Image (cartoon, rainbow, N blue to C red):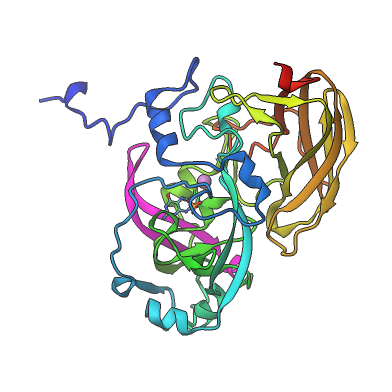
Amino acid sequence: MSKDNSTLNPILNPESKTHTEGDFSHTEVQLANRNSGIALETLRHDITPIGMHYLLSHFDIPYVEDEKEWSLEIGGLVNNPMTLDMEYLKSLPQITQQVTLECAGNGRALIKPHWPSMPWTYEAVGTAEWKGTRLIDILKQTDVKDDAIQWVFSGADEGVDSGVQHDFSRALSIEMTNNPDIMLAWEINGQPLPPQHGFPLRLVVPGWYGMASVKWLNRIEAIDHDFQGYQQVGTYIYQKDKEDKGTPVTAIRVKSLMVPPGKPDWYTRKRLLEAGETLLHGRAWSGFGTPITKVEVGVNDDWFEAEVFTANEKYAWSRWQFNWQAQAGHHQLKCRATDANGDVQPLEPIWDKSGFGNNCVQLTDVWVEDDLSSV
Ligand SMILES: Nc1nc2c(c(=O)[nH]1)N[C@H]1C(S)=C(S)[C@@H](COP(=O)(O)O)O[C@H]1N2
Ligand SMILES: [Mo]
């Protein structure tokens, strides 16, 4: 008997996604409620407070009652496979690093017609202070075999995407993992990782978009081929269209954001401001810890250079500020960062198919009144 469509499991046989006209769907709102972004005013904090850092979890957050239950298996093409518990990991030399993490899909909500996925506008970014141990020190103990070319990092969460069942796994080349700044982290901002950030153990790959920093890490495996897991080859690829082989998403692209000035309108988030001197400020960051060399502020069609306060730590965002004489009327404010490689944020988005890596300048609409007390 041939199966008609009504008997096909829609999770394992989904319709392929296409760009969608019109408003965001219920499904996108549902995703947005699970995966919160930062409130832009928290860009004021050098370190984003716990609970205000953005979140992106594809599947369910694993329930781990006690970190004593946890173990990290390291195997595959190694001469010395290991099973490590949290107590052992915490006995290793510790490092603490401030790292700005950004989701590769940040900015995707601006693509038109939109791509059905997590609809971030600007807010999928945050800076945390991670404590843990260097990944490379542990990997060295495994005596990896000569034919291994990649390490695969897997989390305890599993689910389905585009009909493919998998656990969340990502690979890095053996060469990449020689970077001593990649860490296994168990603390954020001085506290144990909360469930949503990967309790009890996660990978932190500084300078890369967030997908590389595998949460709920419980397996590391050395392999002798290019990893074909869904999160490696089925997504996180810059592709013009479905036919394009594309290039993998890796480093964060140079970007800046502004703390929206004045007061918000509750529903639209548009800004109301009184005329006069106004401090415009925000943050700027780039990939692989590349320093920010310039931030410009745009007021309508004019550009001004802002003052940049370079971050104390390599992978943390830098603060910038600019004094603006706000005059009555409607204005569009922008900010645009340049990094030490000479990379500059584009004024218009450079879209790939699903809206990855959109680092185009943020637009902030403000309405300025001479005297707010009289309105
Ligand atoms: N195991 C696992 N790790 C994961 C994810 C996930 O869904 N599962 N999401 C990734 C993505 S896409 C991002 S942007 C970051 C977000 O980290 P955060 O939620 O701690 O901010 O985690 C990454 N690590
Ligand atoms: Mo992400």
Residue 202: x, y in percent?
A: 46, 64
The answer to whether residue 90 shows anywhere in this view is yes
Give the residues drawn in magenta, as a range: 152-177
Residue 4: x, y in percent?
A: 18, 21
Placement of 162 over or under 215, stated as above or below: above
**In this orientation, which residue lies closer to the viewer: 320 or 215?**
320
Placement of 255 over or under 113, stated as above or below: below
Question: Residue drawn at (46%, 80%), measured in percent from left and top?
Answer: 90
Question: Residue drawn at (50%, 59%), measured in percent from left and top?
Answer: 171
Placement of 86 over or under 130, stated as above or below: below
Could you tell me what secondary structure mostly forms the magenta stretch? strand
Image quarter (top left, top right, bottom left or bottom right) of the N terminus: top left
**In this orientation, which residue lies closer to the viewer: 358 or 39?**
39
Horizontal relation, residue 107 to residue 86: left or right: right
Residue 30 occupies quadrant: top left
Residue 350: x, y in percent?
A: 69, 31
The answer to whether residue 224 shows anywhere in this view is no
Question: Residue drawn at (55%, 19%), measured in percent from left and top?
Answer: 113
Q: Is 173 included in the stretch rendered in magenta?
A: yes
Image quarter (top left, top right, bottom left or bottom right) of the C terminus: top right
